[in-house]
Image (cartoon, rainbow, N blue to C red):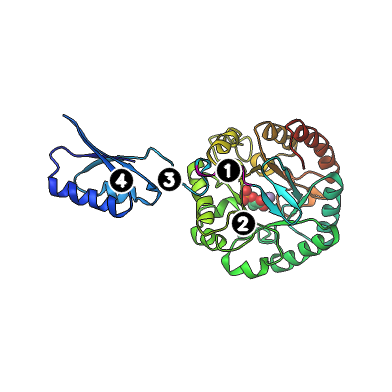
Amino acid sequence: MIVILKDNAPKDSIDKLLKQFEDLGLKNHYSQGTHTTLIGLVGDTSKVDIDMVKANEIVKDVKRVSEPYKAVNRKFHPKDTIVEVSDRKIGGGYFGMIAGPCSIESEEQIIEVAQAVKKSGANFLRGGAFKPRTSPYAFQGLRDDGLKLLLKAKEVTGMPIVTEIMSLSHLDLFSDVDVIQVGARNMQNFELLKELGHCNKPILLKRGLANTIEEFLMSAEYIMAGGNTNVILCERGIRTFETAMRNTLDLASIPFLKKETHLPIIVDPSHATGLTDLVEPMSKASIACGADGIMIEVHNNPKKALCDGAQSLTPEQFDNVMKTIKAYVEFEGKQI
Ligand code: PEP
Ligand code: MN
């Protein structure tokens, strides 16, 4: 981090500032040029509050030269993190194939879909019980009852389950859930992230609708800072000026994130596009970009789905897409 001082800063104020940095355990390189005076800070600057430094009256500007995230940073953890969920793995060459309906609607629906996606080769079952809907009048999910049905599907198929948490007050209900999803709308619900940092379950963290990659990584940092190292990132498209598709799938974020972080990154082409036809091509592209997994919405009767029918594949469509996905995953030298 580089701190640029204002001209004619009084010596005692400079000494006070240097002492503040020293107290944070940082070494400083003080350099007085003819026109500019700089302080170069060396050490772990992730805890430095830039705004507070900027607020100091002798400071002209502050520039970060290293990333504000540490735990998620590949610099300090070069090896890929492999998240283990019962006997399955995601990351470091292991590909997670997550499929299931947007929402759990009934016992028949979730079990039928679970059995179908398992048969096609998915190794995780998804399904929403608590649904973050834009309208308060839209179907909100079966909530506690939905979770019970999802657990039943887990029992019947043996598949680990992924489902979204929306409120900390529901955490006790998630004790038998294998992977807890934090949805796009809650990516910056910091109290939720902090609490999930203290639980021992893998967290699937989705990128916010309009969040930068740095903000995404800082949210993962919240979870890891609490001690939970099992974080899976999920790129699910972002808001842009384009309205033809539900979102714009930021494919470049995958190789970019791979360089920045050791955490596994999966892609959700269903929410990223909102269109069934685009699920297969975007899955192929994601795998080619280095994704460690894919999450796809599948419904036994998409036309009648209570949520996201337009982007949900039928089990038959999913079976076909899976054939392509398997070949692409194999080509990348990974295994489902
Ligand atoms: C979901 O996966 O069901 C979901 C609501 O996705 P997102 O949070 O990405 O919109
Ligand atoms: Mn959905």
* Label 4 or label 1, whichever comes before in sequence order: 4
Marks 1 and 3, how far apart in space?
Answer: 15 Å
Query: Which quadrant, please, contains the C terminus?
Result: top right
Q: Mark 4 points at which residue?
A: 27
Q: Where is residue 302 in the image (x, y as percent from the top left)?
A: 79, 48
| Circle on res. 132 | 2
Dot 4 surroundings within 10 Å: few (below 14), some, or many (20 or more)? some
Q: Position of residue 13 (x, y in %)?
A: 16, 49
**What amino acid type is highlighted by mark number 2?**
Pro
Identify the secondary structure beneath mark 4.
Answer: strand
Dominant SS in magenta: loop
Marks 2 and 4, how far apart in space?
Answer: 46 Å
Identify the secondary structure beneath mark 2.
Answer: loop
Marks 4 and 1, how far apart in space?
Answer: 28 Å
**What amino acid type is highlighted by mark number 1?**
His
Q: Position of residue 32 (x, y in %)?
A: 19, 34
Q: Mark 3 points at which residue?
A: 68
Identify the secondary structure beneath mark 1.
Answer: loop
Instruction: Out of 117 and 11, give the one closest to the viewer.
Output: 11
Marks 3 and 4, how far apart in space?
Answer: 17 Å
Q: Mark 1 points at which residue?
A: 262
Dot 2 surroundings within 10 Å: few (below 14), some, or many (20 or more)? some
Give the magenta-colored segment's residue range: 76-81
Identify the secondary structure beneath mark 3.
Answer: loop
State which quadrant residue 333 falls in. Answer: top right
* Label 2 or label 1, whichever comes before in sequence order: 2
Does the Cβ of the disc 2 residue fall within 8 Å of ligand 1? yes
